[in-house]
Image (cartoon, rainbow, N blue to C red):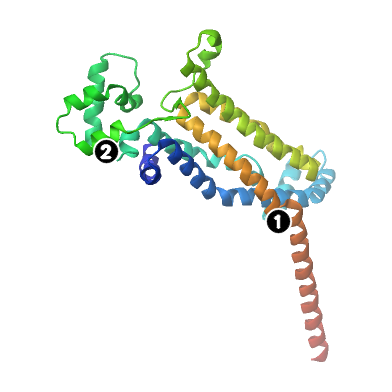
């Protein structure tokens, strides 16, 4: 995963230097990568239209090869190949594409001093060694040591007399929270067992996976309802179940596994994706796409007929 930290950190640092606010930089970062994924979303929308148009042919194949699953699968694959349709484009593939982004984002969450503030790795290494010495033999994970620098900043600065004023100013001015949420902390399932006595921070952190799952569920339900309205047969496709209900579960689980910063990214990503979905349903409406395809096919068929007629007439003249 570390190979992704450098390019993702570079992009994130551009936004941070531009707005000097971690939360706003995270939003701009999320928006950028959602725009990068826009072609995939458009492809998914077109895939939905193709799936709708192929339904009559698929039903004929299912009736023709009822009881012969092997032959049915072969014919279905042949049909998809002829029509240029990829079933995964309307299912879970867009969700899987986002995984490298999440892993790359972890670099700017776990290691903000190096990848966001731009402090060189040797200096950061000295800082984490000092923190490790201050903490002694604790259960703090290695990938969380850099975050602990902010909790022991005065001690670190005191033990590094050669640290430049510029770096000190960057460290002191760095706010690693968003809406009061400590982005370096990880939400815990254990909080659910003692909600009455949970601290304010624990309760705030618990909101991250909750909204992560709900924001994904909103998109999933909207997609499922749209499919039931436009193509009831496709709504029964298991791939639609993966998108509608697998995504919320995935969003909920992943928000409990990583620091809150990753969960905030996921919430923002889901909300932006939902807005884009509504826009795409207007600009790339499946029924409009089907109508356009039918017109193009009619024009092509008539063109071929005219060409065949012209060839036949020339043959007669010869």
Residue placed at 51% from the left, 8% from the top?
197
> Quick check: 61 left or right of 250?
right
Specify few, some or many for label 1: CA neighbours under 10 Å numbering under 14, 14-19, or 20 or more.
few
* Residue most extreme to the left: 161
Q: Is residue 171 visible?
A: yes
Residue placed at 76% from the left, 49% from the top?
52
The secondary element bearing badge 1 is classed as: helix
Residue placed at 79% from the left, 87% from the top?
314
* Residue most extreme to the bottom: 318
Please give the count of numbered marks on the rendered protein.
Answer: 2
Residue 180 versus residue 151: which sits nearer the camera? Answer: 180
Kindly indicate the quadrant of the structure image that contains residue 169.
top left
Residue 299 versus residue 229: which sits nearer the camera? Answer: 229
Specify few, some or many for label 2: CA neighbours under 10 Å numbering under 14, 14-19, or 20 or more.
some
Q: Which residue is mark 1?
A: 83
The secondary element bearing badge 2 is classed as: loop
Q: Is residue 137 above or below residue 183?
A: above
Q: Which mark is residue 134?
A: none
The spot of residue 306 in percent (x, y) is 80, 78
- Per the model, the C-alpha gap separating discs 1 and 2 is 52 Å
> Quick check: 53 left or right of 109?
right
Residue placed at 63% from the left, 41% from the top?
274
> Quick check: 56 left or right of 115?
right
Kindly indicate the quadrant of the structure image that contains residue 186.
top left
Residue 209 versus residue 72: which sits nearer the camera? Answer: 209
Q: Which mark is residue 119?
A: 2
> Quick check: 316 left or right of 160?
right
Q: Is residue 84 above or below residue 190?
A: below
Mark 1 or mark 2: which is in front?
2
């Amino acid at each position: 995963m570390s190979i992704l930290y450098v390019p993702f950190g570079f992009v994130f640092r551009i936004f941070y230097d531009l707005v000097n606010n971690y939360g706003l930089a995270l939003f701009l970062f999320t928006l950028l990568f959602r725009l990068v994924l826009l072609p995939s979303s458009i492809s998914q929308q077109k895939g939905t239209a193709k799936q709708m148009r192929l339904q009559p042919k698929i039903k004929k194949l299912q009736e023709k090869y009822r009881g012969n699953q092997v032959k049915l699968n072969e014919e279905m694959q042949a049909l998809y190949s002829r029509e240029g349709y990829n079933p995964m484009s309307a299912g879970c593939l867009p969700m899987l594409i986002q995984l490298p982004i999440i892993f790359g984002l972890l670099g700017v969450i776990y290691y903000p001093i190096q990848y966001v503030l731009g402090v060189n790795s040797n200096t950061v290494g000295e800082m984490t060694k000092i923190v490790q010495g201050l903490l002694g033999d604790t259960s703090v994970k290695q990938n969380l040591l850099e975050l602990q620098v902010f909790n022991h900043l005065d001690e670190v600065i005191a033990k590094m007399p050669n640290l430049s004023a510029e770096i000190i100013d960057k460290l002191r001015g760095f706010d690693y929270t968003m809406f009061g949420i400590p982005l370096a902390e990880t939400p815990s399932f254990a909080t659910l067992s003692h909600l009455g006595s949970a601290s304010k921070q624990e309760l705030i952190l618990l909101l991250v996976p909750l909204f992560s799952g709900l924001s994904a569920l909103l998109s999933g339900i909207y997609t499922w309802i749209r499919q039931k309205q436009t193509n009831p047969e496709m709504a029964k496709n298991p791939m639609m179940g993966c998108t509608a209900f697998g995504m919320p579960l995935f969003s909920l689980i992943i928000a409990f596994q990583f620091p809150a910063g990753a969960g905030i990214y996921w919430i923002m990503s889901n909300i932006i994706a939902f807005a884009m979905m509504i826009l795409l349903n207007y600009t790339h409406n499946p029924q409009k796409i089907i109508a356009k395809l039918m017109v193009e096919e009619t024009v092509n068929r008539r063109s071929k007929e005219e060409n065949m007629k012209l060839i036949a007439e020339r043959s007669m003249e010869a």
